[in-house]
């Protein structure tokens, strides 16, 4: 017995002198904490919650926000209204069929409130992203419930069908009031950090002809382009005023198409005006979904154009970047169509280059599922690693 005890003591003493391999601690450099690092959570990600019980849904949301926080993001753009509906209890819009089985069914709980609470708990900003005009991305009317304001407009010029889907008529004053009432409801009931519009502005070429005809009676020199630009500018300005009336610290921004001319000539959204005049937006988040080798819209040239466009004192630039293209063929990039396949550091380099711009305030990635894939490809893993290095230095 005594011999066994002596052996045990010997081994214990021996362990004290065996060198233990020290765990390498990588010290995180002080990051640019003022930089906004946003990520889009769309209705596509939210649709995965559909059919789950409340506990599972909340666990899924927690996992998403943990991933976002741990990677280094600090701003969430959550699509709270994508099809004239809502992921929160609303007196104006029905519950979203992305969350419930049928539009208008009772929500299992307040999805938006839970997102806000859990985002703020992790130090993340939560901005409510809405689509002002889109009702459906197809022409089917069968699943539009009578709780949807669009239901009562279907046979009027307040709604129009196009190859892109069903849309509200931007030029209708009731439609504008409906959108603004929905924003006010959000601001009054939820502790969001801002309101965000995406690029769905003027939806069709014919939706507002009757409205334009009436406007021409008052001003015969008014062009259709001028009319449409004034319509969208009115909504943007009034939204900005609503947001600032609620709280001067809240933000309002838009995410227009990356091509400045297309915004002006096709989408009828006057980004040039918003960039030079205060009182419309706090930030522009253009969808600069282009690589460096894109022959039509090379990234560096395009992001610099946007930066130079902004002359207003209080307007910032937050480029939206195309993480969804990582590892994929870029159809419209011409000679640069293979760039996202051949390189695994495009997003990281785009962040580095954007940081050099005078109006830069951060970046955004489209979208959550693209970067946090359940079974990520090797290109995605490599691009994530390279981006992570940039965010840590």
Image: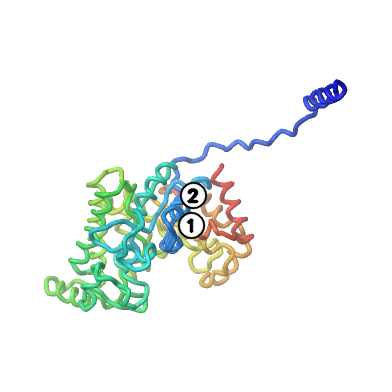
Q: Quadrant of the N terminus?
A: top right
Q: Is residue 333 left or right of residue 9?
A: left
- Residue 10 appears in which quarter of the rendering? top right
What residue is rendered at 54% in x and 69% in y?
A: 330
Asked whether the beta carbons under mark 1 and mark 2 sit within 8 Å of each other, the answer is yes
User: Would you say 387 lies left or right of 310 here?
Assistant: right
SS for callout 2: helix
Q: Is residue 176 above or below residue 59?
A: below
Q: Is residue 51 above or below residue 35?
A: below
The mark that comes first in sequence, 1 or 2, is 2
Which label belongs to residue 68?
Answer: 2
Q: From the image, which quarter does the C terminus lie in?
A: top right
The alpha-carbon separation of the residues under discs 1 and 2 comes to 8 Å
In-front residue for pair 26/386 = 26
Q: Position of residue 94 (x, y in %)?
A: 28, 64
Where does label 1 land, which residue? 368
Residue drawn at x 22%, y 58% is: 181
Looking at the image, which residue is at 17% across and 76% down? 213
Q: Residues within 10 Å of mark 1 (few under 14, many from 20)?
A: many
The extreme front residue here reads 1
Side of 58 where 292 appears, left or right: right
Residue at x 26%, y 66% (from the top left corner): 229
Which residue occupies the extreme left position in the image?
Answer: 218
Q: Is residue 283 above or below residue 155?
A: above
Q: Using the image, tell me which numbered label, if any, was put on residue 207.
A: none
Q: Secondary structure at mark 1?
A: helix
Task: Kindly tell me whether residue 356 is visible in this rendering.
Answer: no
């Amino acid at each position: 017995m005594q011999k066994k005890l002596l052996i045990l003591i010997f081994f214990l003493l021996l362990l004290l002198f065996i060198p233990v391999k020290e765990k390498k601690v990588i010290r995180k450099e002080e990051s640019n904490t003022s930089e906004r690092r946003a990520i889009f959570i769309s209705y596509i990600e939210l649709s995965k919650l559909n059919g789950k019980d409340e506990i599972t849904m909340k666990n899924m949301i927690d996992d998403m926000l943990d991933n976002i926080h741990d990677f280094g993001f600090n701003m969430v753009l959550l699509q709270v209204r994508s099809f004239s509906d809502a992921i929160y209890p609303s007196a104006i819009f029905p519950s979203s069929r992305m969350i419930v089985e049928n539009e208008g069914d009772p929500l299992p709980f307040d999805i938006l409130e839970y997102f806000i609470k859990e985002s703020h708990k992790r130090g993340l900003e939560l901005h409510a992203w809405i689509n002002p005009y889109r009702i459906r991305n197809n022409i089917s009317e069968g699943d539009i419930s009578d709780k949807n304001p669009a239901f009562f407009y279907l046979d009027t010029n307040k709604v129009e069908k196009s190859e892109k889907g069903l849309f509200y008529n931007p030029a209708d004053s009731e439609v504008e009031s409906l959108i603004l009432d929905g924003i006010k409801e959000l601001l009054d009931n939820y502790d969001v950090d801002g309101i965000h519009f995406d690029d769905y502005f003027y939806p069709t070429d014919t939706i507002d002809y009757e409205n334009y005809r009436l406007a021409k009676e008052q001003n015969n020199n008014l062009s259709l382009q001028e009319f449409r630009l004034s319509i969208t500018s009115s909504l943007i300005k009034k939204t900005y005023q609503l947001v600032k009336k609620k709280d001067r610290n809240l933000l309002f921004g838009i995410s227009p198409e990356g091509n400045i001319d297309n915004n002006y000539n096709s989408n009828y959204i006057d980004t040039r005006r918003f960039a030079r005049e205060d009182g419309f937006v706090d930030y522009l988040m253009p969808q600069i979904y282009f690589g460096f080798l894109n022959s039509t819209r090379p990234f560096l040239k395009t992001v610099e154009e946007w930066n130079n466009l902004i002359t207003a004192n209080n307007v910032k630039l937050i480029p939206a970047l195309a993480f969804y293209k990582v590892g994929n063929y870029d159809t419209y990039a011409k000679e640069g169509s293979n760039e996202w396949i051949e390189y695994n550091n495009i997003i990281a380099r785009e962040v580095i280059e954007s940081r050099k711009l005078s109006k830069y305030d951060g970046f955004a990635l489209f979208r959550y599922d693209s970067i946090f894939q359940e079974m990520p490809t090797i290109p995605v893993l490599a691009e994530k690693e390279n981006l992570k290095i940039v965010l840590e230095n």
